[in-house]
Image: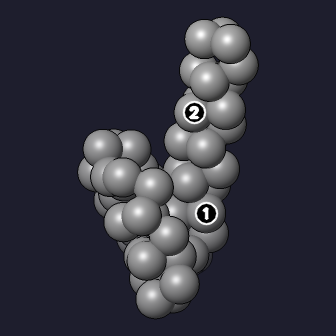
Amino acid sequence: MGATVRNASGYLNSLKVSGVCEAAARALMAEMTVNQLSDLAAFGTMGKICSEVLDTTLQALHVNVNLHE
């Protein structure tokens, strides 16, 4: 029983670290240009997160353009 508890706590700690890393990656990517995000997504590094941030950025640009028309 003790090993199960140790393994579970180790797993939960790794999930916390993964969440912190993902949040940091999202914050960094939010500052990137559309071209940089496209290049990063094409390269394949952290593709899912990069695609989500790119979509959000493009949607924001689209809304911004529509507001100025």
- Residue at x 46%, y 89% (from the top left corner): 43
Residue at numbered disc 1:
51
Q: Which callout, 2 or 1, points at the residue further toward the start of the chain?
A: 1
| 10 or 1: nearer the viewer | 10
Task: Return the residue nearer the eye: 64 or 23.
Answer: 64
Q: Nearer the viewer, mark 2 or mark 1?
A: 2
- Up-down: is 44 above or below 69? below
- Residue 9 position in % (x across, y down): 44, 63
Q: Position of residue 6 (x, y in %)?
A: 42, 72
Q: Residue at x 68, y 13 (%)?
A: 69
Name, please, the residue furthest toward the bottom. Answer: 43
Residue beneath the point at 42% across and 76% down: 40
User: What residue lies at 67% left-to-right and 32% top-to-bottom?
Assistant: 62
Q: Residues within 10 Å of mark 2 (few under 14, many from 20)?
A: few
Is any atom of residue 9 visible in this view? Answer: no
Q: Nearer the viewer, residue 21 or 27?
A: 27
Residue farthest to the front? 69
Question: Residue type at mark 1?
Answer: Ser
Q: Which secondary structure lies at badge 1?
A: helix
- The mark found on residue 61 in the picture is 2
Pointer 2 and pointer 1: residues touching (CB < 8 Å)? no
